[in-house]
Amino acid sequence: MRNRPIPGSSGLVHAVSVFGDPVLHSPCEDVTDFGPPLVRLVEDMYATMYAAQGVGLAANQIGVPLRVFVYDCPDDDEVRHLGHVVNPVLVEADGITVRGPEGCLSLPGLEAGTPRFDRAVVEGRTVTGEPVRITGTGWFARCLQHECDHLDGRVYTDRLTGLRRSRALRAARRAPWARTG
């Protein structure tokens, strides 16, 4: 087995866009160029995700409105899932709905009980254009749904309702990183 570089080890760390930034609230464009710039973007995304101590990161979270996300996330059995998906489509989300704690690198320090399906399947491409299908359960299924939402211009607070939503949005407005104006 040959040694492979650690994802993100040659990447640049970018600033993470925060809640309220228009790039987080607009659907992303499909990737059409599977060349070196896409490889560099994915490498930078890994570096940024690790620097921010996250388990997933969508391209629009670093200001790039393309349909790409990276992940390094355990499932409920502590099995590590590491990868990336280009032009992902959430093709299945089913099983029981679990309301669990969910946070986001674009809403640092905040968390809310967010309903998600316990199983998710995402199809897309690798950086080289090869088809990929990823199935996740538990925490990893939550991650897959969360990152697909980002690429559709949604953040987890969009999934909240009632008092839970009001509290989360109030906390976001009052956070030290909140966008003003």
Image (cartoon, rainbow, N blue to C red):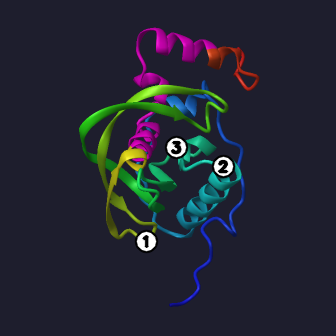
Whether residue 118 appears in magenta in the rendering, the answer is no
Coordinates of residue 103 in the picture (x, y in percent): 55, 34
Q: Measure the alpha-carbon separation of dots 3 and 2.
A: 22 Å
Label 3 sits on what residue type? Answer: Pro
Instruction: Give the residue at mark 1.
Output: 128
Q: Measure the alpha-carbon separation of dots 1 and 3.
A: 19 Å
The quadrant in which the C terminus is found is top right
First in sequence: mark 3 or mark 2?
2
Instruction: Give the residue at mark 3.
Output: 65
Q: Nearer the viewer, mark 3 or mark 2?
A: 2
The residue positioned 66% from the left and 33% from the top of the image is 108
Q: Which mark is residue 53?
A: 2
Q: Measure the alpha-carbon separation of dots 1 and 2.
A: 26 Å
The residue positioned 43% from the left and 55% from the top of the image is 31
CB contact under 8 Å: marks 1 and 3: no
**As drawn, which residue projects farthest toward the bottom?**
1
Whether residue 153 appears in magenta in the rendering, the answer is yes
The residue positioned 66% from the left and 15% from the top of the image is 173
| Figure check: 40 above or below 98 | below
Secondary element at image label 3: loop
Rate crowding at label 2 as few (under 14), some (14 to 19) or many (20 or more) other CA atoms within 10 Å: few
First in sequence: mark 1 or mark 2?
2
Rate crowding at label 1 as few (under 14), some (14 to 19) or many (20 or more) other CA atoms within 10 Å: few
Characterize the magenta stretch by its predominant secondary structure. helix
Coordinates of residue 172 in the picture (x, y in percent): 63, 19
